[in-house]
């Protein structure tokens, strides 16, 4: 049995813009999502990590997801964020189905960590509450074992697995164990700035990856994806050296910059998406200036590729 989802292109994780009063700016979100569709994303993941799921109320998650679904209008899958406390995750999963989303990215439970059996039961209860296919997110308080994913892979509501730990050995075990179900699940690299590690993940059977960079500079992220899917390692590695490695070096200076830099990059390009919500912080003016240099280099790289 195959998953009802299909992804053909780089995966787009939009930011959640906040207006002057601090509430989500849904008109600006619609502009942000719509402007990226022309660059060919394989799926849109609103109200997830880059979209500051951790800082949104359930009502705000619902509004963000509904806006994305309306803008995308069936052109590619829309996978909504859900997670946290069990009751909250169930409500968000049901809301996503009502909004017309195509699936759920199930983010980790909040604060507590239980046994593996308890984690599996948590996933199963959320999955049972909504008709949507579920992609589980392996990180933080949601650490899955190969046996856990073997069981979950047999559940027709479970459509995929996203790794956010970087444990290549364990992820390989999970890919192999899930494959025993006879179902074709989607496997994602969900590490920060995943382009930098995707070469390794591809080698263990994880072909898909999150791209926060697509939200900020879609033409460069799409160029990387084309090189990746075409097997053009020379171009892919050139983009990594010239753009992604400097971006990662800046990102690693401050916790939370995997999100903060994306919003800052959008502001530098004239999209007034606002600041990140606490506990995340915005980059300093000096860091923003360095980000601007990295983005300028990214645009140069795209121009060079177009002229080649």
Image (cartoon, grey):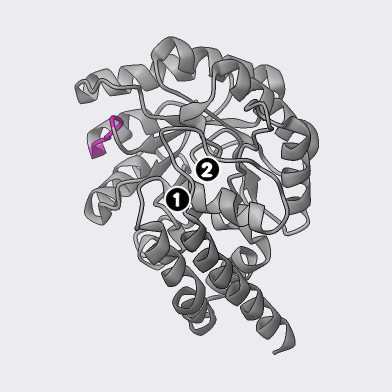
The residue under label 2 is: 50
Which residue matches tag 1?
Answer: 258
Left or right: residue 204 compared with residue 224 = left
Q: Position of residue 52 (x, y in %)?
A: 51, 35
Seen from the viewer's position, the closer of residues 219 and 173 is 219
SS at mark 1 in the image: helix
The residue under the point 59% across, 76% down is 297
The label shown at residue 271 is none
Q: Residue at x 62, y 44 (%)?
A: 14
Q: Magenta stretch: residue 145 in it?
A: yes
User: Label 2 vs label 1: CA separation?
Assistant: 7 Å
**Which residue is farthest front?**
285
User: Is there a contact, CB below 8 Å, between mark 2 and mark 1?
Assistant: yes
- Classify residue 239 as left or right of residue 307: left
Residue 66 is one of the magenta-drawn residues = no
Q: In the rendered view, would you say 118 is above or below 209?
A: above
What range is drawn magenta here?
Answer: 141-146
- Residue 173 in the image, given as x and y percentages of width and height: 25, 48
Q: Where residue 113 appears, x then y in whole percent? A: 23, 23
User: Which residue occupies 27% across, 31% down?
Assistant: 148
Image quarter of residue 298: bottom right
From the viewer's perspective, tell me whether residue 249 is left or right of residue 79.
left
Residue 187 position within the rendered picture, expressed as x and y whole percent measured from the top left: 44, 47
* Mark 2 nearby-residue class (10 Å; few <14, some 14–19, many ≥20): many
* Residue at far left of view: 115
Q: Quadrant of the C terminus?
A: bottom right
């Amino acid at each position: 049995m195959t998953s009802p989802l299909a992804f053909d292109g780089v995966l787009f994780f939009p930011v959640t813009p906040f207006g002057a009063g601090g509430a989500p700016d849904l008109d600006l979100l619609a502009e942000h999502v719509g402007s990226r569709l022309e660059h060919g994303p394989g799926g849109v993941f609103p109200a997830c990590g880059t979209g500051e799921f951790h800082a949104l109320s359930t009502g705000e998650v619902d509004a963000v997801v509904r806006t994305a679904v309306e803008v995308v209008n069936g052109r590619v899958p829309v996978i909504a964020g859900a997670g946290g406390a069990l009751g909250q995750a169930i409500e968000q999963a049901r809301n996503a189905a009502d909004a017309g989303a195509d699936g759920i990215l199930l983010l980790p439970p909040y604060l507590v960590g239980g046994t593996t059996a308890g984690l599996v039961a948590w996933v199963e209860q959320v999955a049972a509450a909504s008709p949507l296919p579920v992609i589980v997110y392996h990180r933080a308080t949601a650490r899955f074992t190969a046996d856990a994913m073997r069981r979950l892979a047999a559940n027709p509501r479970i459509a995929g697995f996203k790794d956010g730990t970087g444990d290549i050995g364990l992820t390989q075990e999970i890919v192999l164990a899930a494959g025993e179900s006879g179902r074709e699940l989607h496997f994602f690299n969900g590490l920060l700035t995943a382009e930098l590690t995707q070469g390794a993940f591809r080698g263990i059977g994880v072909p898909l990856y999150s791209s926060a960079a697509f939200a900020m500079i879609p033409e460069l992220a799409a160029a990387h994806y084309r090189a990746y899917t075409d097997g053009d390692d020379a171009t892919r590695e050139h983009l990594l050296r010239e753009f992604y490695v400097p971006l990662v070096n800046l990102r690693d200076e401050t916790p939370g910059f995997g999100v903060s830099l994306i919003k800052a990059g959008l502001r530098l390009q004239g999209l007034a998406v606002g600041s990140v919500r606490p506990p995340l912080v915005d980059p300093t003016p000096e860091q923003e200036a360095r980000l601007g240099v990295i983005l300028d280099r990214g645009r140069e790289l795209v121009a060079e590729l177009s002229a080649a």
